Image: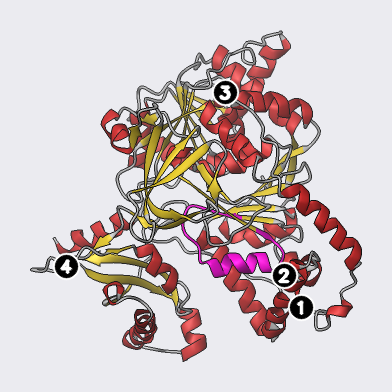
């Protein structure tokens, strides 16, 4: 576990948004009749859904992509911050994957061995992961934010024979090398270093592989792949408990591609923006393997503080994100519109364009083009996953002409279990069960809420070296179907869309049996302008059985200064936020009322997908008391 004390969402800066030329709808030059006919035709096609792919392994996808999309740009990366993004084609990517795989299996004898991959999102990470999936051995993607002792622990636990690491992780790897005698090779990305002891450069290995290929060695591409064999080991983020190793197969990953292809249409002209960490299944599967299956390019963000300039330079069409990132973009853009004095006009135009879209005329891209231009100008899809998001934010994304989709899943489902079809958006839901999955609600209450159970072809093999933990979350029914207990609480609506309302492990149970889901209250609190981040939990009280419904809050000091003035004391800030909480309490059942407010001065402990580690936060408080 890493305490992200220094983690802060950067202060995005957008150019002034003036919304010129939208005062009069007639100024927007549009051929309404032609556009209406086009939209009606597209709508009829979309309502049928899409024909899904039928892949069994990622190697099948790789074979297809390297031939079909050879000349397409695949990866865009800025290797030097002062230079432009460098474009790498599918052909170049495939050549490097095959060369790396050939050398690792033939020269370094790592076939069927476990290989740790650790580093920031970079071209060499993609090459390394694909080489593993296509036949080298078992990939172990590791969170680059882990401290040295935990990196050492993961390498031990996974019994890795090699570690591929980025240059930025060199110092950390040096600290743990001597404690890992079982590791045969430490391979540094973007390095030409020749083999010295156990250390060797990534580029050296690729060149050695190319030499073998020139001599006619085709052994790597001839390695057969068992779709159901253990191929990837991913350690969970541990937001509710200590991390477990999740064993994933090639079929699990390939079925993600098949499932998404039935709900969302991607084109060769599309470009995904990679900002989430690749060790996470959400990014490595949906942000890497899925685009590869469609000939799509991937632009690698240089880091959170570079999001806005990188969006504007690479002009992506799709963004995979977590709620915290989307909500921050939403707040910053709207604050810019407020400063321009055009907020009322924008809201008016949202109503007008929604009405027109309702009768088949969609002019949102023209009307809100200036907003979209700030996000690169071509963005057509934003996908939110990993945590609940305020429906207001999702609706705003739709309102300005960008398709807002939500995905749902866990590392254990590799990860997609539900997704919004792009032809049937429903903001607020977590999507529909994907075509290879079935979802049911276990023991629902009177509102239809209960634990979400998942049966899916994407479901993990099991937890690594932990049969007891596997059996505790997977039930096998009379027909032999494996049902995964997600730990999430939710319900299905009449159209089959899933709504997540909380987690069973986060639930606060009152003495009279009422269940309170912190996420539900956090969404309400998230609408308070003076609150930047918050965490609702049940606080233990000495001598009391009943938990005290409490909230830890990180104030939005910038907004507080704007609304309430400068130089406020801690007590005044506490009172301002408490007044807002009292208003929320008035609109909630009495048993859900928040009774205690704690102003938090440091950052929350988070996973690398920006989810608060509740159990770690609560444990930290207990440690302070003891």
Q: CA distance from mark 4 to mark 2?
A: 48 Å
Res 95 visible: no
How packed is label 4: few (under 14 Cα within 10 Å), some, or many (20 or more)? some
Q: Position of residue 52 (x, y in %)?
A: 66, 35
Residue 388 among magenta residues:
yes
Evaluate if marks 3 and 2 touch, with contact meaning CB atoms under 8 Å apart: no
Which label sits on residue 194?
3
Number of numbered discs: 4
Which label sits on residue 546?
4
Residue at image x 26%, y 73%?
Answer: 591
How packed is label 3: few (under 14 Cα within 10 Å), some, or many (20 or more)? few
Q: Which residue is mark 2?
A: 371
Please name whichever residue, 12 or 85, is drawn nearer the observer in this view of the structure: 12
- Please report the bounds of the magenta region as a residue range: 383-403
Mark 4 or 3, nearer chain start: 3
Which label sits on residue 19?
1
Please name whichever residue, 73 or 78, is drawn nearer the observer in this view of the structure: 73
Mark 3 or 2, nearer chain start: 3
Mark 2 or 1, nearer chain start: 1
How packed is label 1: few (under 14 Cα within 10 Å), some, or many (20 or more)? some
Q: Is residue 582 left or right of residue 323?
A: left
Tell me the element at label 3: loop
Q: Position of residue 269 (x, y in %)?
A: 79, 45
Q: CA distance from mark 4 to mark 3?
A: 64 Å
Which label sits on residue 75?
none
């Amino acid at each position: 576990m890493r305490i992200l004390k220094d983690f802060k969402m950067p202060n995005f800066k957008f150019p002034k948004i003036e919304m010129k030329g939208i005062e009069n709808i007639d100024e927007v030059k549009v051929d309404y009749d032609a556009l209406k006919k086009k939209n009606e035709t597209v709508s009829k096609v979309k309502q049928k859904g899409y024909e899904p792919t039928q892949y069994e392994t990622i190697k099948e996808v790789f074979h297809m992509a390297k031939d079909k999309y050879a000349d397409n740009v695949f990866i865009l990366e800025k290797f030097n911050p002062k230079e432009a993004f460098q474009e790498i084609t599918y052909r170049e990517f495939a050549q490097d994957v095959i060369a790396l795989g050939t050398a690792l299996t033939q020269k370094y004898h790592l076939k069927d061995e476990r290989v740790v991959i650790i580093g920031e999102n970079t071209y060499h990470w993609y090459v390394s992961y694909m080489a593993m999936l296509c036949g080298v051995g078992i990939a172990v993607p590791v969170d680059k934010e882990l401290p040295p002792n935990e990196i050492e622990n993961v390498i031990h636990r996974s019994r890795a024979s090699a570690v591929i690491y980025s240059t930025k992780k060199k110092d950390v790897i040096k600290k743990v090398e001597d404690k890992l005698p079982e590791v045969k090779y430490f391979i540094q990305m973007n390095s030409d270093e020749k083999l010295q002891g156990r250390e060797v450069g990534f580029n050296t290995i690729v060149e050695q592989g190319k030499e073998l290929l020139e001599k006619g060695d085709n052994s790597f591409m001839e390695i057969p792949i068992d779709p159901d064999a253990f191929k990837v080991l991913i350690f969970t983020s541990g937001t509710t408990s200590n991390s477990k190793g999740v064993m994933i197969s090639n079929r699990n990953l390939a079925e993600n591609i098949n499932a998404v292809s039935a709900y969302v249409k991607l084109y060769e002209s599309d470009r995904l923006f990679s900002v989430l960490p690749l060790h996470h299944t959400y990014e490595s599967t949906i942000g890497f393997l899925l685009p590869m299956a469609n000939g799509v390019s991937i632009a690698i963000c240089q880091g959170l503080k570079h999001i806005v300039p990188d969006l504007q330079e690479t002009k992506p069409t799709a963004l995979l994100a977590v709620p915290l990132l989307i909500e921050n973009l939403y707040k910053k853009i709207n604050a810019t519109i407020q400063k321009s004095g055009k907020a009322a006009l924008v809201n008016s135009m949202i109503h007008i364009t929604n009405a027109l879209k309702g009768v088949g005329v969609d002019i949102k891209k023209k009307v809100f083009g200036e907003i979209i231009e700030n996000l690169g100008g071509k963005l057509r899809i934003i996908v939110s996953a990993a945590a609940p998001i305020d429906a207001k934010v999702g609706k705003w994304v739709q309102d300005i002409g960008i398709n807002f989709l939500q995905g749902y899943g866990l590392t254990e489902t590799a990860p997609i279990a539900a997704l919004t079809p792009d032809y049937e958006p429903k903001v607020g839901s977590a999507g529909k069960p994907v075509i290879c999955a079935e979802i049911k609600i276990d023991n629902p209450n009177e509102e239809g809420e209960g634990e979400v159970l998942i049966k899916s072809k994407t479901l993990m093999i099991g937890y690594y070296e932990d049969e007891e933990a596997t059996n505790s979350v997977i039930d096998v029914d009379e027909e032999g179907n494996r049902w995964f207990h997600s730990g999430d609480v939710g319900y299905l609506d009449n159209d089959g869309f899933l709504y997540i309302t909380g987690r069973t492990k986060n639930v606060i149970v009152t003495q009279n049996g009422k269940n309170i889901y912190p996420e539900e209250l956090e969404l309400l609190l998230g609408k308070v302008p003076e609150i930047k981040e918050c965490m609702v939990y049940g606080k233990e009280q000495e001598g009391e059985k009943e938990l005290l419904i409490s909230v830890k809050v990180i104030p939005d000091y910038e907004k507080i200064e704007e609304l309430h003035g400068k130089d406020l004391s801690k007590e005044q800030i506490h009172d301002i936020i408490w007044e807002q909480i009292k208003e929320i309490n008035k609109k909630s059942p009495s048993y859900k009322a928040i009774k205690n407010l704690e102003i938090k001065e440091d950052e929350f402990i988070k996973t690398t997908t920006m989810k608060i580690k509740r159990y770690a936060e609560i444990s930290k408080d207990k440690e302070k008391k003891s």
